[in-house]
Image: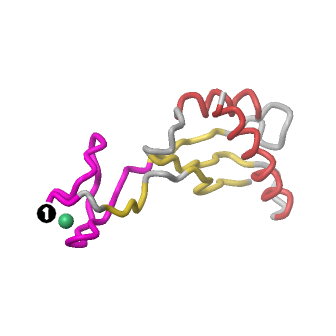
Amino acid sequence: MHEFSIIENLIPQVEDFLIKGNYRRAHKIFLDVGELSGVIPDALTFAYEICAKGTLLEGSELRIRVIPVTASCEACFLKFEVHNYSFFCPQCQSRELKLLTGKELKVGEIEVE
Ligand SMILES: [Zn+2]
């Protein structure tokens, strides 16, 4: 399962952050997940509960922040949110788009003690 390997990579990174910052433990980890990142948020939280056991993150909570897909048009430079995978500009109908957000998969914030 893809989500398990993501969490297995994530936990040592957050532990490292806690150790370096002399924090005792983390309360909440906010993970930014783009709509196009291809992961299932529920599967991430499930994997987290299992993988966090026995680590510094045991008892902390993983909160998923879903990041919407936004793009800018290469023709008219409009910035807009992409809904339902409609990858064209709502203003000029161009399909020459630059993806701005939506592929994130990273820790956004860590609440520590
Ligand atoms: Zn346009």
Q: Quadrant of ligand 1?
A: bottom left
Front residue of 71/18: it is 71
Local packing at callout 1 (Cα closer than 10 Å; few below 14, some 14-19, many 20+) is few
Relative horizontal placement of residue 67, taking residue 54 as reference (left or right): left
Task: Report the residue at 20% width, 72% height from top.
Answer: 76
Front residue of 90/4: it is 90
- Tally of numbered tags: 1
Q: Position of residue 68 (x, y in %)?
A: 38, 50
Up the image or down, 96 lies above or below 2; here it is: below
Task: Report the residue at 25% width, 46% height from top.
Answer: 86
Instruction: Identify residue for label 1.
Output: 92
Element assignment for label 1? loop
Q: Quadrant of residue 23?
A: bottom right
Q: Position of residue 13 (x, y in %)?
A: 77, 53
Relative horizontal placement of residue 2, taking residue 35 as reference (left or right): right
Up the image or down, 13 lies above or below 22; here it is: above
Which secondary structure dominates the residues rendered in magenta? loop
Front residue of 66/23: it is 66
Task: Report the residue at 34% width, 57% height from top.
Answer: 70
Q: Position of residue 29 (x, y in %)?
A: 64, 47
Quarter placement of the N terminus: top right
Colour mode?
Answer: secondary structure
Quarter placement of the C terminus: bottom right
Q: Amino acid at mark 1?
A: Cys
Relative horizontal placement of residue 25, taking residue 111 as reference (left or right): right
Relative horizontal placement of residue 66, taking residue 32 as reference (left or right): left
Magenta stretch: give its range. 67-94
Q: Quadrant of residue 77?
A: bottom left
Q: Say if the magenta span includes residue 14.
A: no
Q: Position of residue 40 (x, y in %)?
A: 52, 32
Is the distance from the Cβ of mark 1 to the nearest ligand 1 atom less than 8 Å?
yes
Front residue of 54/67: it is 67
